[in-house]
Amino acid sequence: MPSSNNKHHLEDYAPIVTAGVINEIEELARLLGPAKIVNVNSTKEGGGVAEILGWFIPILEDLGMTVEWKVITGNTEFFTITKKFHNALHGQPEEFTQEMFDSYLDNVEKNAPEIPDDADFVVIHDPQPVAMIAQYPNRSNRWAWRCHIDLSEADLRVWGFLRPFVERYDGAVFHLPQYTKNLMSPQFILPPAIDPLAPKNEELTDDEVTAILYRLGVPRDKRIILQVARFDRLKDPFGAIRAFKLVRSWYDCRLILAGGSATDDPESQAVLAEVQDMAGDDPDIHILNLPPDSHREINALQRAATVVIQNSRREGFGLTVTEAMWKAKPVVGTDIGGIRHQIIHGNSGFLIHSVEGLAYRIRQLFGNEDIAKRFGQQAREYVRNNLLVPHHIRRWLLVFHSLRQTNGDLITLPPQKVTE
Ligand code: UDP
C-alpha cells in the first residue's frame, strides 16, 4: 500500500525491481533483528548525502530498525575548513595550516552530536564528523565510516590527518572499488541509489512538466541541455556554458544550469555569481538557483531535457546522472569517478574529456533522435537493475551483518524465493 508524506514501504518497490531483491531484504532484516542505527552527517538539506538519508531511514524503520539522523554543527570557519578537506580529498590544491587541523578537531570535540550507548550501529558520513569516533574509546557498538567522495587522488596531508580516525572504525564504506584506500580496517563497496517513488523521480505528465518549466521561466520551444549541480567549481558550470555556445552555432537550443547551495558549502554563492556573470544576459541560458526542496522542479527539468550533461571535474558518484538515466535521458558526462561507472559509453550515453568533446557529443545526440532514445532506454534499465532504493538497502544490510560478524561466522541466507 503506497504510504503518505512521501515515505514509502519496501513493497511499493516490488513492481519496479525483481521480486528476489525484496525477499532477500526482508530475510536479511529479519536475521539482523531490531537494530538501532545512528547516522551522522553535516547537513539535513542539499547534496547527495541528505538526499539518500531522506529515503534510507524510513525504509529501515519499516523493516523494524530504530534509526536516528544527527547532524554535526559548526561555524563558518569549520565548514570552510571541511570544504577545503573535501576539495583536497578530491585532489584539488589547497593550503593548510596546523591551526586549521586544530580548529577542526576543536569543533568536532565541542559540536559532535551525542551517540546513545544503546546504538548497535553508527554510520558517520564523510569527513566532517569523522574524528568524533575518538570521543568513544570504550564503545561496544559497531561504527562504519561512509565515504561519499572520490579519494583516489586524495591530498596526502589531509588524508594522512584523517586516516588514523578512519582506521578506528570497524569498517569504511566506499562507492566504488577505485576509491578504497590501503587501510588496516575492513572496507566495503556500496554504490548509492535513487528513490524512483520520491518527488524527485516520480512520473510526471507532460502537462505537469510544461507547467513547472513555465513557472521557472523556461519555454519548451527548443532543445534543452541541462546540468543539475550545486554551484561548485568541481561541477564546472563554466565549461558547460562554453560547450553550449559551441552547440548553439549548429542547433538552436537552451542551456539550463539548475543548482542550489548546501548549508555546508560556503563557496557556492561566489560560484553562482561568477556563473551569472559568464552567462550575461543571454536569453537562452537559464541559471536557476533553486531552494533545497525543489524536487519536483528538478524532476520536471530532467524530463524536459533533450540531453543531460554532467561536466564535473570530480564526482563522488553523481546522483544527478542516475536521476537523469532513470528518466530515460541520454547523459553526456566527464569520464571520471562515478560518472564513468554509470554511463556505458556508446550504449547509454557518452563519456567525454573536454569542452569540445562535450559539445560534439551533444550535437551527435541532437542530430540522431533514434540513438538518443535508445541510449535513454538502456540507461533506464541499467538504473532499474542496479541503482534503486532496494539495491541500496540490501547492500547496507549485508554491511551491517558483516560488521556484526566479529567472530568470523558466516551469514547463511536461504535460497532466494522468486515470486512472479
Ligand atoms: N540537487 C538538488 N538541488 C540542487 C542541486 C542538486 O536537489 O540544486 C540534488 C540532485 O538532484 C541530487 C543531489 O542533490 O539528488 C546531488 O547529488 P550528486 O551525487 O549529484 O552530487 P553532490 O551534490 O553530492 O556532489
Image: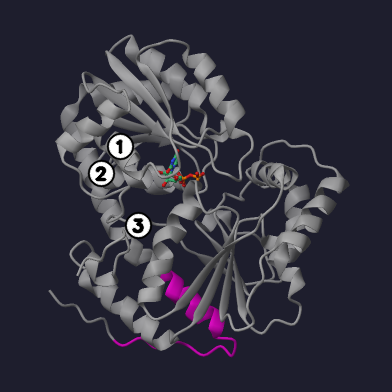
Q: Residue at x 40, y 43 (%)?
A: 320
**Label ID, residue 387:** 3
Magenta-tinted stretch: 394-414
Q: Is 173 part of what is drawn in magenta?
A: no
Q: Which residue in the protein does label 1 denote?
A: 302
The answer to whether the residue bearing label 3 lies less than 8 angstroms from the nearest atom of ligand 1 is: no
Location of residue 250 by image quarter: top left
Q: Is residue 397 something that shows in the picture? A: yes
Q: Secondary structure at mark 1?
A: helix
Q: Dividing the image into 4 quarters, which one contains the C terminus?
A: bottom left
Measured in 3D between alpha carbons, the distance from the residue under mark 3 to the one under mark 2, in whole angstroms, is 13 Å
Q: Which residue in the protein does label 2 denote?
A: 327
Measured in 3D between alpha carbons, the distance from the residue under mark 1 to the one under mark 3, in whole angstroms, is 17 Å
Measured in 3D between alpha carbons, the distance from the residue under mark 1 to the one under mark 2, in whole angstroms, is 7 Å
Q: Dividing the image into 4 quarters, which one contains the N terminus?
A: bottom left
Vertical placement of 184 versus 232: above or below? below
* Contact flag, marks 1 and 2 (Cβ < 8 Å): yes
Q: Earlier in the sequence, mark 1 or mark 2?
A: 1
